[in-house]
Amino acid sequence: MKKNLLVSACLLGVNCRFDGKNEKNQDVIQLAKEYNLIQVCPEQLGGLPTPRAPSWFIIGDGIDTIKGLNNMRNEDGKDVSKNFRDGAKETLKICKLLNIKNAVLKEDSPSCGCNKIYLKDKLVDGVGVTTAILIKNEINVMSENGIRSLNKASIPN
Ligand code: SF4
């Protein structure tokens, strides 16, 4: 029986990005041969509309957001930290419900980034809010870039 793998919905071609577009990635889609791909968009789960104003961190990264710091703003200057926290918590609930231990999430996103996030207009080292909550709960997270250099045996079961 195939195991469940959490995936950022935009990587599967869902038009859930802030600008109403997607990040369709054939390498990720191919993972459906080996896994049940469970698609989520944490920002939508957090109550944000699509399309929406882009958001970024003003200090720190997702680790600080899940600790309760209101460190996220959207392009209009609105504090959207709670939306991002809510989306991360909903995503974690899905993982627990479906016994998901691994995730492939979209790099650079304020929710899904695994190595890089935007601090204002600069791309810096850090993790998104959903990535932070998943890692804290011992779920293995990798980016779409990570899987390109891996063979399927490298994705933990
Ligand atoms: S929150 Fe994640 S799944 Fe949703 S559009 Fe952004 S990167 Fe994609």
Image (spheres, rainbow, N blue to C red):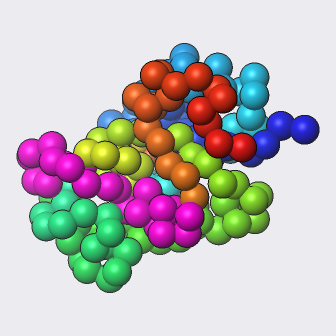
Tell me which image quadrant ligand 1 sits in. Answer: top left
**Residue 77, position in %: x, y?**
14, 64
Task: State which region is magenta.
Answer: 117-138
Residue visible at 32% across and 55% down in the picture: 127
Instruction: Name the outermost residue toward the left.
Output: 121
Quadrant into which the N terminus falls: top right
**Residue 19, position in %: x, y?**
33, 37
Q: Quadrant of residue 35?
A: top right
- In the picture, measured across the screen, residue 82 lies left or right of residue 150, that is left
In the image, is residue 134 part of the stretch drawn in magenta?
yes
- In the picture, measured across the screen, residue 63 lies left or right of residue 140, that is left
**Residue 113, position in %: x, y?**
35, 47
- In the picture, measured across the screen, residue 79 lies left or right of residue 129, that is left
145, above or below 58, in the image: above
Residue visible at 43% across and 57% down in the picture: 131
- In the picture, measured across the screen, residue 124 lies left or right of residue 87, that is left
**Residue 30, position in %: x, y?**
64, 20
Instruction: Name the outermost residue toward the bottom.
Output: 68
Residue visible at 75% across and 65% down in the picture: 97
Q: Quadrant of residue 152?
A: top right
